[in-house]
């Protein structure tokens, strides 16, 4: 018997959205047709509708599709009143008030970081980044902070998807270099982006950990080096965001003295001591 209240075309559209949200990289029309079982003409029309309404975005380089900003906002709303955004937002507001920097909250989606909250600095306008924007994980301080605290299997799965692209002379461009960076992040408890994405742009990020010690999100501050120095960032801003990260992680059930139990042993916990102001990058000194 046909259910008159059941909308088959809506089901197909929701199925496409579900596939886009679960897949680590943009999916092309042909791939979606194969995976979903939806006819090519119908699938194309669904994608056109989703793209025009903001629920999907088409990658100009690959012609693949991924979830759009409207889906991000819906997903965050679904987390409920105690979702990660609601937990982090008071801390983000306080940090922006004290530092005057832009403060961001991001989550991992495939091999990208998606911005789920962004409190803009009053001093600089960055129109290209907003809630729903995404960056390759290796080009973002938040991305590196999340990677450093992922379970090993999840980390390796993400690393296999990364396509390295040199943005500046400081950009990480190999798996080996990225793994070395992640090791240093685990030791210090925070990640930096020192002009790796854009010349003159600096960022500090901390992971937000769940009860098992795995990163579910990351929070960062970013600013132009023409406004704040690296030294000021490490001496003043870094301890501030480290403390906030530890408090948010504690609210999500993470505690430094919790045993791993039967779960996979978590990554080394957030650093208790403040950063070493004499070594802002955690890397060995090299002459440029």
Image (cartoon, rainbow, N blue to C red):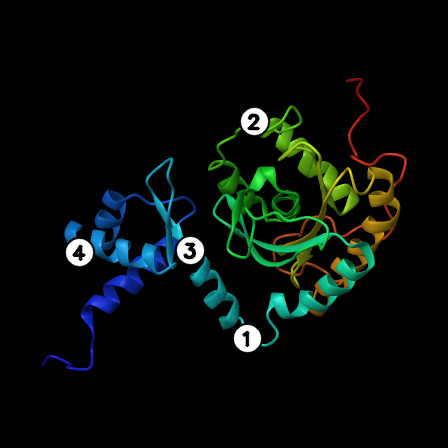
The answer to which image quadrant residue 89 occupies is bottom right
- Calculate the distance from the C-alpha at mark 1 to the C-alpha at mark 4: 33 Å
Q: Position of residue 279 (x, y in %)?
A: 85, 34
Compared with residue 138, is residue 20 higher up or lower down, i.e. above or below?
below
Query: Is 151 situated left or right of 258 in this image?
Result: left
- Outermost residue, top direction? 287
Residue matched to label 1: 80
- Calculate the distance from the C-alpha at mark 1 to the C-alpha at mark 3: 20 Å
What residue is drawn where x is 50% and y is 55%? 132
Question: Can you see residue 173?
Answer: yes
Which of pointers 4 and 2 lies earlier in the amino acid sequence?
A: 4
Judging depth in this view, the residue of 90 and 25 nearest the camera is 90
For the residue labelled by badge 3, is the local secondary structure a helix, a strand or a loop? loop
- Outermost residue, left direction? 1
Q: Marks 1 and 2: which is nearer the front?
A: 2
Q: Residues within 10 Å of mark 1 (few under 14, many from 20)?
A: few
Which of pointers 4 and 3 lies earlier in the amino acid sequence?
A: 4
Which of pointers 1 and 3 lies earlier in the amino acid sequence?
A: 3
- Calculate the distance from the C-alpha at mark 2 to the C-alpha at mark 3: 25 Å
Residue matched to label 2: 166
Which of pointers 1 and 2 lies earlier in the amino acid sequence?
A: 1
Q: Marks 1 and 3: which is nearer the front?
A: 3
Residue 68, labelled with which disc?
3
Q: Residues within 10 Å of mark 4 (few under 14, many from 20)?
A: some
The answer to which image quadrant residue 120 occupies is bottom right
Residue matched to label 4: 42
Which of pointers 2 and 3 lies earlier in the amino acid sequence?
A: 3
Q: Position of residue 79 (x, y in %)?
A: 53, 71
Q: Position of residue 60 (x, y in %)?
A: 37, 39
Q: Residues within 10 Å of mark 2 (few under 14, many from 20)?
A: few
**What quarter of the picture does the N terminus occupy?**
bottom left
What residue is drawn where x is 79% and y is 54%? 242
């Amino acid at each position: 018997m046909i259910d008159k209240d059941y909308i088959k075309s809506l089901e197909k559209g929701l199925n496409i959205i579900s596939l886009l949200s679960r897949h680590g990289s943009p999916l092309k029309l042909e791939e979606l047709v194969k995976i979903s079982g939806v006819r090519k003409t119908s699938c194309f029309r669904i994608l056109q509708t989703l793209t025009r309404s903001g629920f999907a975005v088409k990658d100009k380089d690959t012609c693949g599709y991924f979830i759009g900003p409207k889906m991000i906002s819906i997903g965050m709303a679904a987390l409920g009143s105690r979702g990660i955004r609601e937990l982090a937002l008071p801390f983000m507001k306080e940090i922006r008030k004290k530092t005057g920097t832009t403060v961001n909250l991001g989550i991992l989606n495939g091999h990208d970081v998606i911005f789920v909250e962004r409190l803009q600095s009053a001093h600089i306008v960055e129109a290209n980044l907003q809630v729903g924007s995404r960056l390759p994980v290796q080009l973002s301080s938040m991305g590196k902070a999340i990677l450093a605290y992922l379970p090993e299997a999840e980390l390796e799965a993400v690393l296999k998807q990364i396509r390295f692209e040199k943005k500046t002379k400081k950009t990480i461009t190999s798996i080996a270099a990225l793994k070395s960076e992640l090791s240093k992040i685990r030791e210090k408890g925070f990640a930096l982006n020192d002009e790796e994405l854009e010349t003159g742009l600096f960022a500090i990020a901390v992971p937000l950990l769940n009860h098992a010690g795995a990163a579910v999100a990351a929070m960062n501050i970013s600013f132009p080096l023409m406004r704040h120095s690296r030294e000021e960032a490490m001496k003043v801003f870094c301890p501030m965001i480290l403390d906030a990260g530890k408090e948010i992680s504690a609210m999500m059930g993470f505690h430094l003295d919790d045993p791993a139990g039967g779960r996979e042993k978590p990554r080394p916990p957030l650093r208790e001591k403040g950063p070493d102001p004499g070594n802002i990058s955690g890397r060995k000194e090299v002459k440029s």
